[in-house]
Amino acid sequence: MRDTALGRTGLRVSRIAFGTWQLGGDWGAFAEEDARKAVRRARELGVNFFDTAQGYGFGASERLLGDALRTELREHRDELVIATKGGLRDTGTGVARDASPAALRAGVDASLTALGVDRIDLYQVHWPDPKVPLAETAGALRELVEAGKIRHVGVSNYSAEQMAEFSRVLPVETLQPPYHLFRREIEDTVLPYTRGHGIGVLVYGPLAHGLLTGTLSEETVFPAGDWRAKSGVFRGETYRRNLAVVRALQEFAAFRDMTVSQLAIAWTLAQPGVDVAIVGARRPHHVEDSLAAADLSLDETDLKDIDAIVAEATSVAGPTPESV
C-alpha cells in the first residue's frame, strides 16, 4: 500500500483510507463480524488510516471500528491514524448540525470512549453549522488540541471561503469533501484553495455511493434503512443515463484489466491535490478489490478518454444530514 504525507499534518497515511459510514446504519443491515473482518483485512493489506464519525450511528460505527482494531491499537498505536468527525446531533427524530463549543467538547469525549483511545489523530467538523460562528467552532477545537485530546484538526464539506474564515482562528489542516467521476465541483475553487494552503485532502464517495461499483442496475432494490431507497439519484431517467455511462466505463476498465470500481478510485487518486480516497467495505473481499486501485496508474490519454465517457453523465450529489 502506497502512502503519502497528509498535507501539513506531518502524518504519513495510506493513500486509501478505510471508511466506516456503511457501518452506522444509513446503508441498511449488515453482518457485524464480516465488517470487523473487513477492517482487519484492510490493516493486513497495509492500510493505516481509518475514518469514522460520531454521526455514523452516533457511536455505533466508532465502537465497531475500535473493537475491530483493539489488538492493533494496543500493540501498534503509533502506526495507526484514527480520524473521526463531530458536529452532528441526534434529535430523536432526525439529525441536526451542532458545531457549538459545548457540543464539540462532549462529542470528542464520546468519540474517545466509543473508539477506546486516549487521543484522536484527526478530528474533523462533519458539516458547517450556519448557526454557530466558525470562530467559535475553531476556538473550541484549538482548546481540545491544547488539552491533548486531539492531535490535528480538519473540516468536511466546507467551501474555500469557510476554510479561510475558520483558519483565522485555527489553521485548517485537512479537508474531507465529496468527490467522484459524477461529482466534480470541488475542482473549481476548493482544490485550488487546498493546494495553495498545504491542506491535506481525503475525499469521500469515490465510488459515487455504489454507482461506480458496476453492481447496480435498473432492477436494484435498496433495502429498508438504506438512504439510497429514497434518493432521486437512484431512480428515473438520471439514474438510467448514469448506468449507461457506468457500462461504458466498465468496458474501458476491462480493456485495461481493471474493475470499474478500481478505475474510479485510481482516477480519484490521480487528480492534483487529492491525497487520499476513503473507501468503505462490509466484507473482506471488497477490501481487496478496492485496495488494488492504489497501485494502478492512469496516463494522460486514459484521463482524457475517461472525461469523454463521463461527459454524458448527470451530476450525482450525496445526502446531507437533514436528508438521511
Image (tube, rainbow, N blue to C red):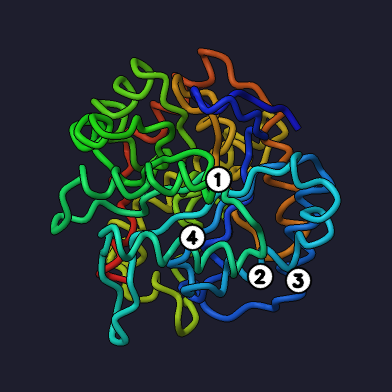
Marks 4 and 3, the one that precedes in the sequence: 3
CB within 8 Å, label 3 to label 1 = no
Tell me the quarter of the image containing the N terminus.
top right
Circle 2: residue type:
Leu
Q: Residue drawn 50% across and 81% down?
A: 223
Query: Disc 3 marks which residue?
Result: 34
Depth check: give the residue in front, 155 or 105.
105
Q: Is residue 297 above or below residue 66?
A: above
Residue 319 location (% of width, % of height)? 32, 61
Secondary structure at badge 3 equals helix
Q: Residue drawn 55% across and 49% down?
A: 83
Query: Disc 1 marks which residue?
Result: 278
In whole angstroms, how far apart are the C-alphas of marks 1 and 2? 17 Å
Circle 4: residue type:
Ala
Circle 1: residue type:
Ile
Disc 4 crowd, CA 10 A, few/some/many (<14, 14-19, 20+): many
Q: Residue drawn 60% across and 45% down?
A: 261
Marks 4 and 2, the one that precedes in the sequence: 4
Indicate which disc residue 53 carries.
Answer: 4
Query: Disc 2 marks which residue?
Result: 64
Judged from this view, the residue extending furthest toward the front is: 147
Secondary structure at badge 2 equals helix
Circle 3: residue type:
Asp
Secondary structure at badge 1 equals strand
Which marked residue is nearer to the observer: mark 1 or mark 2? 2
Q: Residue drawn 25% across and 59% down?
A: 100
Q: Quadrant of residue 237?
A: bottom left
